[in-house]
Amino acid sequence: MADAGKDALYQQRIAIYPRSVKGRFRNFKWAVLGLAYSVYFLLPWLRWERNVGPDQAVLFDITGRKFYVFNLVAHSQDLLWLVGFLLIAALLLFFVTGIAGRVFCGYFCFQTLWTDLYLLIERLVQGDRVARIRLDRSPWNANKLLRKAGTHILWLAVAFWTGLTFTLYWDNAPQLLVKWFTGSAPFAAYATTLFLTATTYVMAGLAREQVCTYMCPYARFQSAMFDADTRIVAYDEARGEGAQARHKINRELKSREQRRQQGVGDCIDCGFCVQVCPTGIDIRDGLQVQCISCALCIDACDAIMDSLGWERGLIRYTSETESEGRKSPVWRPKTIAYGLVLLIAIAGLVWSVSSQAPLEVAVVQVRQPLFVRLSDGRVQNSYELHLANKTDEAIELAIMMHGLAGAELDVGNFDALQLAPQHSLRVLARVRWRTKHREKGSRGFFLDVIPQQRRDIGMISAPATFYMPGGDR
Ligand code: SF4
Ligand code: SF4
């Protein structure tokens, strides 16, 4: 039998007890966390005055098929905006990764932000690294039970509020909150909240660094975006190891001069950089896939260097090129290309949003049946007219047609219809036409939607096709 430990498919998880650290990158991470949490948790409660629609600043109204984002109202027909937004997010990620490596993972990713909060709770309840290790190794007693249970209860509370907050974005937040707790909210609200509670608790509380190492696809393909000029967190091996490798501080190797004389590097092998790492790796072993570029090891090493009075930067943000003593340009063909495509995508989305038509008309041919031969000999085609009023005022519309001489248009009771503000409507339009005996195939014509008393909007002529028996379909 093969050596079980060597050939095992699954490596047993080694518990990680990240130690707290102070420093500029830690401060920046707290600032990002504070901002991200404020936005996420407070946004559903922000009220916003609109002429029409809900008074919630950000609301994704699934039943009404409208997304309200401050003054912007996106209808279901504006799905391309979502595609554009996702494209911009992906391009931004490529662009930033090309320049600064995995900074998204280290500072902005949800997994990092929530794990940071969970670690803070763990630290507040159970103590810092050494206390937590001691607690885990101690036998179960009232103190251990209380601290462990307290941690998990607080984690669950954060997970629950995270899930509930997400749900509040999809309906009027204050009303939904009351409904949720009085048992009268829709099933989807309970299911979403509980699903997100469970996933947040498992991902940030239990799985933690394993999400980044084993589950996140970005960690796998990011190497394709890296090159020799990409900024990474790296250990200065030449300085840290010297000619004779690193060494702990002792009486003979206390000052820098003593160390230099004996060929020993500046790393005093204190292990602080390893202890603070949330993924439990040793940056001195080189760039590793587990490294999320959070820079906490930089803070740790800087603190050690400060305490010794040596210059900072034994661990620092650098690039392969820079560590070889050459300059790393920020603007390289790859980053310029990402930047340009990103700018084009942003400009395209901004243009599309700012030039949103006040009235949108789309014609969909009813194909089953494509045409009907009526008893009076005429041929009838049917169309679904999709009308969307994107303004805050009602629009009265008349529907007419041109391009098919002698044809009759029947839109039922909708000859002059009132389209409510920010509303969409589907109108069934029937066109009846007495075709010439031998006429086959199809003929193009236009359905005209004419806003009444609104010259600023103007008539919209939507092209349509009239099919006749025996023609191409
Ligand atoms: S090695 Fe440093 S930068 Fe990378 S994850 Fe660990 S602490 Fe963060
Ligand atoms: S914190 Fe700095 S000095 Fe301490 S082990 Fe890490 S690299 Fe060496």
Image (spheres, rainbow, N blue to C red):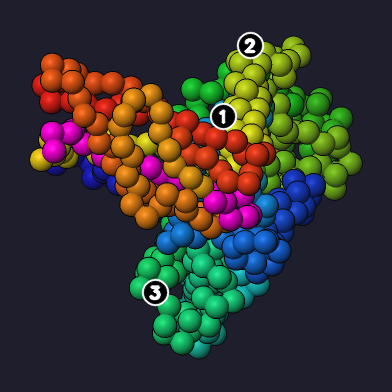
What whole-number distance in Å separates the C-alpha atoms at marks 1 and 2? 15 Å
Q: Secondary structure at mark 1?
A: helix
- Quarter assignment of residue 48: bottom right
| Residue stretch rendered in magenta on the structure | 376-396
Q: Quadrant of residue 187?
A: bottom left
The residue that disc 3 covers is: 186
Q: Which mark is residue 384?
A: none
For the question of whether residue 276 can be seen, the reply is no
| SS at circle 3 | loop
Residue picked out by circle 2: 333
Badge 1: few (under 14), some or many (20 or more) residues near its Cα, within 10 Å? Answer: many
358 above or below 461? below
Residue 199 is a magenta residue? no
Q: CA distance from mark 3 to mark 2?
A: 52 Å
Mark 3 and mark 2 in contact? Answer it, CB < 8 Å.
Answer: no
- Of residue 343 and residue 453, the one placed in the foreground of this image is 453
Closer to the camera in the image, 255 or 180: 180
In this rendering, the count of numbered labels is: 3
* Residue at the spot of label 1: 91
Image position of 318 (left or right of 282): right
Q: Residue 373's spot in the image, x, y percent?
A: 12, 35
